[in-house]
Image: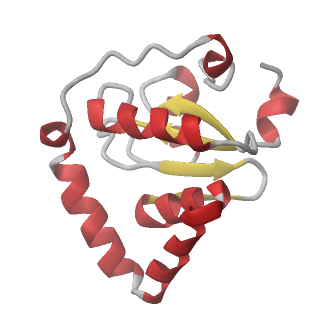
Amino acid sequence: MSEQNWQEKHVVFYDGDCGFCNFWVQWILEKDKKDEFLFASLQSDFGQKFLKERALNSIEFNTLYLWKPNHYYLIKSKAVLKIANLLGGIYKISFIANVFPKQITDSIYDVISKNRKKLANQKCFVPDYNQRKKFIEF
């Protein structure tokens, strides 16, 4: 994928070794009817570069990041809520969660993140040909 193509998308950075995280990546892929998202594991060279350029933790992978190149990046609950908003449809109702302070929504996120490996079995997600085009691996 060319740099120009991914710079126009939202990049979801996730823990590539987590079955729970992979489940949600697959869920986003299925719901992404407007072709808004690309994906990169935090362990990939691309993910590590993203983290290091922003002085973010590049060893622990318990945080989801949503990055719109040249615009912003969001973390934890704000990233999740923005993803839901971008998916549109019924998922836009998630905006209601924005009435709660970030400390509360991030606290909920942190509890889920801490237990994420218990919440889902490690599954081997194998994307199909079209889905593979949405993963950044360089």
The image position of residue 113, as x and y in percent, is 25, 51
The image position of residue 70, as x and y in percent, is 78, 52
Please say if 89 is above or below 129. Answer: below
Please say if 89 is above or below 124. Answer: below
The image position of residue 62, as x and y in percent, is 30, 45
Question: The N terminus appears in which quarter of the rendering?
Answer: top right
Tell me the quarter of the picture where residue 38 sits.
top right
In the image, taking residue 13 as reference, residue 108 lies left or right, namely left
Residue at 47%, 32% (x, y): give it.
26
In the image, taking residue 40 as reference, residue 130 lies left or right, namely right
Residue pushed farthest right? 4
Tell me the quarter of the picture where residue 126 sits.
top left
Residue at 42%, 26% (x, y): give it.
43
Front residue of this view, candidates 88 and 71 = 88
Front residue of this view, candidates 138 and 127 = 127
In the image, taking residue 118 as reference, residue 76 lies left or right, namely right
Tell me the quarter of the picture where residue 91 sits.
bottom right
- Whether residue 49 is visible here, answered yes or no, is no
Front residue of this view, candidates 34 and 136 = 34
In the image, taking residue 35 as reference, residue 27 lies left or right, namely left
